Amino acid sequence: MTALFGLSQKGKSPTVTAQRHLNLYAEINQDEKPLVFYGTPGLRFCFQFGETPVRGWIVVGDFFYAVHMDKFYEVDNSNTYTERGTLNTSSGFVDMSYDGQRILITTGTSGYIYTIATHAFSIINSPGFVNSANTCTWMDGFFVADFGDGSDSFSISADGITWDALDFASAESNPDGIVRVFFDNGEIVILGESTTEFWGNVGATDFPLSPIKGAAQEFGLAARRTLTKFNSGIAALMKTKQGQIQVMFFQGYVPKKLSTQEIDSIINGYGPSSNATAFAYMLGGHPMLQINFPSANASWLFDASTNLWSPLEYGTNGNRHRAEMYIDYLGKPLVSDYENGNIYEISTDVYTDNGMTIVREIIGRNVYKNGDQFNVNELFVEFETGIGLVSGQGSNPQIMLTISKDNGRTWGNELWTGIGKIGDYMARAIWRRLEKARNWCRMLHWSVAKKSKI
């Protein structure tokens, strides 16, 4: 397996590598099969808010709270949702934070406070609150909200209801506008257009927060909605001083680049990415980061356990993945749909995306033999066999092989073989008498009715 299939992704030139792993993730084992590919989980439909997507959500105890259209809802574990308030906008993302009693909501045009115990929902009318706040968070007894509208300032409030016009501060390392305020590991992260600062609580009476000297980094947040908790730190789509877009990970104050040169080439070729979104979740010990690029109709999945990047696609036409936002609700991983109000559970026991067939594809390494022609007498790929369905589509699962002789630029005929009907655990996916070539690259392609492993 390792001789034929690696962990790279096609980047600037297929001559270097044409590799691709579509809707797959890998595990590196210590036994005789060191590299194994598994199919990414499917989406199980839970319930629907309506025809438009959820704007934002947050988990509080046994409930989660969501904004859909102009309504603020409380949702219980039976998927019953109760309206708790009305906003003055009906579209665009919202941000939410929780202090143990109240939920603060910022929309970019107004702020709202919801009190859990009394179900009181109200717009913030305090003169010191800046209505253009886009993002908010909470730390050490204070709500924190940015000023929005390109300002480099942010303000604080003890209860989210009363905001003192004098309780504000400005980012200090560079006069760039704040894109997002975020809480991580006991500190406030102030992410601007070209710099990132870390602020801590120093307990001063005039203003309790102060920047941590020497911690500022010259990376700006390229897309507000890509910042997410990930693998004991935070990750986001960041922008360098030179304007390059990269996927970065911060653990403490030290940034680490997650995107490879191939991935950098791909995502910078997408064009403007300020509307990109991201979320993170755990998949059987794999820390996963999913990034969506709406303008390019593309989604990517990064696995921190293998450093593998894999494109995610919905259906058969190369569309981006359906998932937009994520919450862990009572141990259940839920995602919202980017196009409508559907809520799904991410599940390894589901083999479709809300009923849509999931297509898997893997393109292997280019194989050479010193520029000489060589014969391929036999290709054997070990699948988890004998797991077809009892009847109908999927009862006789098939795998398709096609071969490229020009570094993955064009492909030959489709060569199909079976991988075992249900109970046929000794089936073998094998192709014989394959053609001569000087450059040999393989593509395996299949759709999923049940679990897949290669």
Image: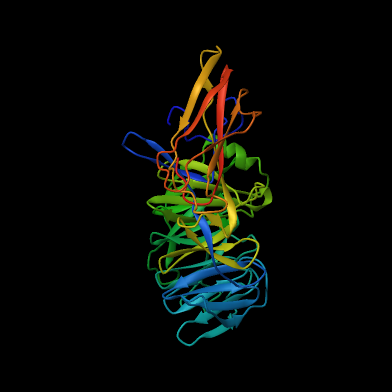
Q: Residue furthest left?
A: 31
Note whether residue 118 is visible: yes
- Image check: 59 left or right of 323? left
Residue nearest the observer in this picture, 8 or 273: 8
- Residue 215, position as x, y percentages in the image: 43, 50
Q: Split into 4 quadrants, where in the image is the N terminus? A: top left
Residue for point 48% across, 76% down: 78
- Image colouring: rainbow
Residue 345's place in the image compared with 409, above or below, is below
Residue for point 53% across, 51% down: 449
Residue 15's place in the image compared with 30, above or below, is above
Residue 42's place in the image compared with 257, above or below, is below
- Image check: 63 left or right of 33? right
Q: Split into 4 quadrants, where in the image is the C terminus? A: top left
Residue nearest the observer in this picture, 439 or 163: 439
- Residue 253, position as x, y percentages in the image: 42, 49
- Residue 202, position as x, y percentages in the image: 38, 64
- Residue 421, position as x, y percentages in the image: 48, 45
Note whether residue 223 is visible: no
- Image check: 31 left or right of 263? left
Residue nearest the observer in this picture, 326 or 21: 21
Q: Residue furthest bottom?
A: 118
